[in-house]
Amino acid sequence: MNSPTQLATQIRFHLGSLGETNAHHPFEQLCLGLTRRRLVSNVIPATGPVAAGGDGGRDAESFWSMLAKELPDTSFFTALATEEAVVLAVTAQRDNVPSKVRADLSKVCGNGEPVDRVIYFTITPVDTAKRHELQAHARNEYSIGLDIWDAQAIANELASPDLFYLAVDFLHVPSTLAPERDESDGDLPEWYVETRDEWRTRSEHVGSMGEFLDLREALRFSSFNLEVRADLPDWLGSARALRDAARSDASVINRIDYEIIIATAFGLNTLKPVDGALREYFDRLASRPTDSGVLVDAITLLRLAQANQPRGETTVTVQEVAGWADNLQAILGRELAAAPGENTRVSLLGTAAMLALGPREFTTDDLDELTVAGPRMSDIYHEMSEAKREGRPLSASPEIGELRDLDAAMAHLVDLVASLPEAPMAPLEQLMSIFDLTAPALIDHPDYFRVRSALDDATVEREGKAAAGDRTQSRAVALLQADRPLDALREIHAAKLNWLNGDAAEGAAIMMLLASKVYSDLGFALAAKQYAMSAASIAQGTDDPGLAVLVARGIILTATYEHQAGQWLTATHTFRIGIWAQSQLAGDSWSFERYPYFENMVVDQCFIIRTAAALRPAVLSVIDPVVQSTNLDALVEPMLETVAGVELLDERASVDSADRSGLGRPFSDVGAVREYSWAALGNVWVVTTPNDRAHVLAAERFVAATQIVLAELATEDLLLVPGEICVEIEVSDSRMASEEVFLRAGERDPGASGHRVRLTRGGALAVDADQLEVVSAAIQVLVTQSLLGRPALTAMLERTFERGLPHMLTCVRPYDELVDLHKDEFYEEIRVLSAGILEPGRRRSPQPPPELTPRLPAHAAAYDHTAALEAIEDRYEMLLRPVRLTLPRLAAHSRFMGLVSDLRAEGWKDWHLLTAIANIVVNKRAVSRGLNMTRSITQADFDKFRAIMEEDERSDDAETPADAFTEDQMWFHLANAAAATARRLGLELRLDRFEPRSFLSVLGDRFNYWDDDVDHEPIL
């Protein structure tokens, strides 16, 4: 018997054959049948010869029907009927499908009646990014919705038992392949059948809570499951009869109304038939006391009303919803004030927080401005069910500005977590789920981490660390969906740790793979490599055969990340190991559809081969045997043939392309010296090391640790001086003393390039000592580039370690053990190759991803606007004196005034000019008087220099020639003066050499250096 996946693959094959024969009509009929059973029931075929375009691009369209309004509970047809103007468009075209979609949209929207939504069917796969692009095009150009069903989506649905007949009729798939019905499909659950039979024969109702509970599950099952949707009118009728019998019992009526409203919303995708019941529900809340459970239900109904307003599926007004929400808030306030004990109080605090964490109510203007109605309620339920079944977290929720009341929510949560010790059994599951989904909107609140930690501790205490791992995963995915990858990483690491400590290997491995993807997206290829291999290591160490494929996946992803880092020969050899693992551990091992990571690396391998053949043919002697030994050439050669006519990039253009993509320099693992380069936080890092096994493992250990540290510190205001950071890695066979590990560039011998880091050979130290050595080196390099003063620096590092930096750096094994995949012979082979890295003499300039741009306040913590202006006033007063005669002479010098014009165009103000001119003049004057103005200046000479700076310029002082005021000298002396200003601000300049513009850019960005000024007389 074929599995559903195998059957869908065969159906997809038959769909492909339609494209080969251009069989448009059968495909159109098939899509029409699928639409009527899954999407919209009231559709009919359009007319006009298809090939001639006589249908105006419309293969079918909806017809107007009032049945869904007038008889909402009566049939399957009315459940899927729509009032929208829906058009079906179908193409069997195989090439240029996106262009075909755009052309058809233009026809559809340019002819005939107006359209609300187009459902487009194609036999060609459409990737997610292209689908989103086309949907955005439909919204922006035509203000319509666009659903795209490609070959995979169609095949998956046709593999269902109730739609397989379409595959037989129109694709001629053998009927012997018909799928068997699952028990839950063919045979309804026994409890449901028994309950249905009982209620069909019941003629009297007492209206009790027990009777209600007996009905509720069957009513819900019918509303949420399409196979029994036809029973829904009967269940709704029984619920109404039960409600009538309850008469004045408000507690039963509230709950019955709640279930009727829920069943109608999700079963019929509208609230209009129950709008009256909704209003009565909230009227009862306003007039009668109720319990906290009903208040939680009320919040759910409030959200339902809000969700249906954009789609026009309720007559409830925005004013009514806002009034209900305000009333709920008032009720909760009264109930909290009168709470009899901590358990009740904690429960009410949770309910109040849930209300405040919901989306703010719409205004009339909001609804008028909406261009997209949003998903149907059944679609939302389907997505939630799929996510739960597949172990995926739910979609993230609103941004900060869309929450009802962020500050009130956090105040309730702070109060709640403080009271948890006195109410250890208070139900928190629903609140925790909402908290996790709204994490992107909460994370910047000052109380977020306190609340998060307390809720996680409660989860560990109640359910264990694995459950806490589930929760942190939900937050991580919500943060990723909100484009907060740096914050998501912290949650990913917390989930990883919880699952490791909770003996949940699969969860830990999945989190490590997710961490590897996030690090890769941030441009941190070696950190990504560490986590990909950590996932492989965990999978390899378990007895679970279901995890075995993660071994291959981790190794192949490692090859991908090596390619990203520019280590192209290493990536090729790692890919070979991954292919061997894939063939042994993965079913249908060469399937691109099942293993997209495998396809991605095959594409990368093609690019490596093509670039090598054109620009570095000598390295093919290392690549070709690898490709042939795995039979990878059977995949690679056809791909290369398809691009044989495409012109190759030359060496410079190839480097430009790599830089734009944030990649390491291609072939940087070839030759006697290996290089790693990447960009982050305004700096370009270039790490080099001898190209042998011990040095490469040590260098990668350092690079991976540095990248993990950079990701964790990216949200801090590090005050890094932009520029290139060069580090040479050396290896010692014996343990290094801590003070010998890092040697700053300025302390090295002349001619040395950058800082030196000397690490102990891998395996020679205990794990903790090894980690401490490498992270200390990484932090020392980073600190050298930072202007933070020691107190601020210490506080920042303490925060970083408190957030868990140590467990981020090491996963399951030391780095050298994880990634040591290649023997000494491999390193010897690539070290002797002469032609290596592309454009070796060109400056490294990879572009960092935008996600690495930190969210910082407008100014640094040390900036004081008032003090800055006072200092500028002092400069104008004090610095004019030593150059009072020089300034008029310079003002008469045309070339110098041209320089002044250029500097002003770059942002220089008069006080910048005055500072640089005064420092040039007084330095030369001090030298003429015998002062030592070199780096070894004594305190006595410095005091004399200050005295000269405070003197009025005399007519007998030697004139400073105009050619002394070059552009470089002006920048140099302004930066030197700014260094003294930085020290007065509590900053520390640790670089021995720095580029003036880079240093001053930090002061400009974080201290308003280029914008602050005061009123003054012109100096020139």
Image: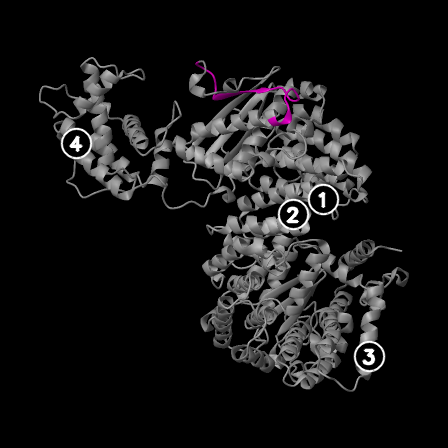
Q: Of marks 1 and 3, which one's residue comes earlier in the chain?
A: 3
Q: Which mark is residue 198?
A: 3
Instruction: Indicate the secondary structure of the residue bearing disc 1.
Output: loop
Q: Of marks 4 and 1, which one's residue comes earlier in the chain?
A: 1
| Residue pointed to by mark 2 | 469
Q: Of marks 4 and 2, which one's residue comes earlier in the chain?
A: 2
Instruction: Indicate the secondary structure of the residue bearing disc 3.
Output: helix
Q: Which mark is residue 878?
A: 4
Q: Which mark is residue 504?
A: 1
In contact (CB < 8 Å): disc 1 and disc 2 = yes
Q: Of marks 2 and 3, which one's residue comes earlier in the chain?
A: 3
Kind of residue at disc 2: Gly
The span from disc 2 to disc 3 (Cα, nearest Å) is 43 Å
Which of the 4 image quarters holds residue 943? top left
Viewport quadrant of the N terminus: bottom right
Of the two numbered discs 3 and 4 in the rendering, the one whose residue sits closer to the viewer: 3
Q: Is residue 24 above or below residue 390?
A: below
Q: Which mark is residue 701?
A: none
**Residue that protrudes farthest toward the left in the picture:** 955
